[in-house]
Amino acid sequence: MQLEQLKDLVVETLNDMKARDISVMDVRGKTAVTDYMIVASGTSDRHVKAIAETVAYRAKEAGEQALGTEGVEAGEWALVDLNGVVLHVMLPKVRDFYNLERLWSAPALVAETLPRSAAAGRV
């Protein structure tokens, strides 16, 4: 399955499961962990769990086994790692607290570089 198809499958499943406030972020060039980070909200811990489990199930049906899941049992924040797509499903209060959209849309930090002469004296 192509990356774009996988992303579309996840978004379609989120819509089918009535997930709220779906956000798709292209994080290529910002991290080597994944290409797309998708964040969505569930209305209850059961809803969060059901969404995460259904996404993992439908991806597996399409030939994409999840590399792992986290937090599904607790239900406040569940993560489904599909390699090229990482899904975070959270309760609204948890999503507001962590604000992943702001984190991943922030401009990359540029490391300060020392002048060549200053760097030469350091070990």
Image (cartoon, rainbow, N blue to C red):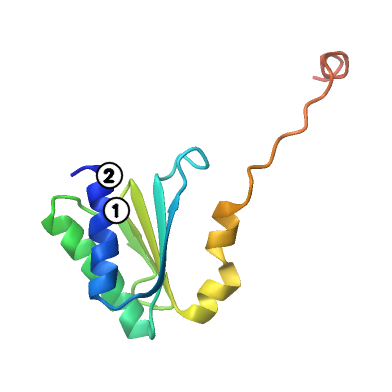
Q: Is residue 55 above or below residue 94?
A: above
Percent across and percent down for residue 123 are 80, 19
* Residue type of the residue flagged with mark 1: Lys
Q: Is residue 70 above or below residue 113?
A: below
Give the residue drawn at x 20%, y 52%: 65
Is residue 65 toward the left or the right of residue 14 in the image? left
Q: Quadrant of the N terminus?
A: top left
* CA neighbours of label 2 inside 10 A, class few (<14), some (14 to 19), many (20+): some
Which quadrant of the structure image shows residue 118?
Answer: top right
Give the residue drawn at x 51%, y 73%: 95
In front of the other: 77 or 93:
93
In front of the other: 57 or 30:
30
Q: Secondary structure at mark 2?
A: helix
Residue at which label 2 appears: 3
* CA neighbours of label 1 inside 10 A, class few (<14), some (14 to 19), many (20+): many
Percent across and percent down for residue 17 are 25, 76
Give the residue drawn at x 43%, y 44%: 33
Q: Is residue 104 above or below residue 93?
A: above
> Which label sits on residue 7?
1
* Residue type of the residue flagged with mark 2: Leu
Q: CA distance from mark 2 to mark 1?
A: 6 Å
Is residue 54 toward the left or the right of residue 88 in the image? left
Q: Is residue 89 above or below residue 38?
A: below
Is residue 69 toward the left or the right of residue 30 in the image? left
Percent across and percent down for residue 16 are 22, 73
Percent across and percent down for residue 77 are 43, 72
Are discs 2 and 1 less than 8 Å apart at CB? yes
Q: Secondary structure at mark 1?
A: helix
> Which label sits on residue 18?
none
Q: How many marks?
A: 2
